[in-house]
Image (cartoon, rainbow, N blue to C red):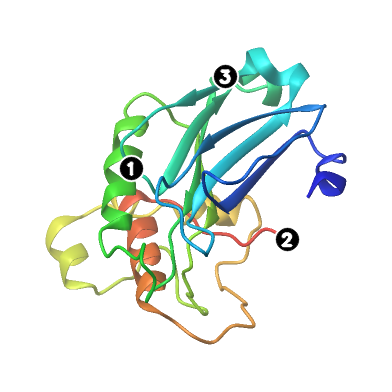
Amino acid sequence: MIRCTSNYEMTTKTKLDDCDVINCDEFIFSFKNRHKITSHRSGGIALGYRKCLDKCIKTFDTECKFVYWFSVDKKVFDLDENIVFGIVYIPPVNTNYTSEEAFNEIDVEFQRFSQNSKYIVLLGDFNSRTANLSDFYDENSDDEFIVQHFTDQFDYTDVHILDNLKIPRERNSPDNVVNGFGRKLLDFCKSNKSFYTKWK
């Protein structure tokens, strides 16, 4: 990991616990760890950033154990306001840390940050498999909830943003499997008018 971080300004890591120690002279690390120590990595989260960014980054102590929030000063990205990031680790199903409420807990805090921030990015390991299913409501959706509650497409979808950025609407994933967490992630995106992308 240290070799990789030398090329970047920030790094994140999941699957940490209280036994882990990360030392890197050029970076400052902060942690949100699981407190139970087991023979397996227990899903803690780490944020590392170069020391020169120390005054530009602020971490937030919140209750949800599945996300670690921090903000980056607007001048770093030359924006009109700060960006809030949430590093997510949702343990896979059939583990000691699995929680069906993980997305709900993240959503509660997402809503809280959304009240004061227009730039919010969630990143990390959602253990969600979504295949090629959409993460937005189509303008021509015949979904019963949409039909009954919305008259203007901009009230329920921001899909035009993808068009403006020339990002294809159709997902092209080599993974054809959809799991329960994948459906929860897509529902989260739809309800928050957010988009899911796979970074490489």
Q: Going from the N terminus, do you reach mark 1 or mark 3 first?
A: 1
* Camera sees residue 7: yes
- Viewer-side residue, 127 vs 197: 127
- Say which quadrant the C terminus sits in: bottom right
Confirm or deny contact between disc 1 and disc 2 (CB under 8 A). Answer: no
Judging from the image, what secondary structure is the residue with disc 1 in? Answer: loop
Q: Is residue 164 above or below residue 73?
A: below
Residue position for label 3: 80
The amino acid on which the numbered mark 1 sits, given as a three-letter code, is: Cys
Would you identify the image quadrant in which residue 182 lies?
Answer: bottom left
Q: Kindly give the residue lying farthest to the left in the view shown.
A: 148
Residue 200, disc: 2
Mark-to-mark CA distance, 3 and 2: 27 Å
Q: Is residue 143 above or below residue 200?
A: below
Q: Residue at x 27, y 65 (%)?
A: 100
Residue position for label 1: 64
Mark-to-mark CA distance, 1 and 2: 27 Å
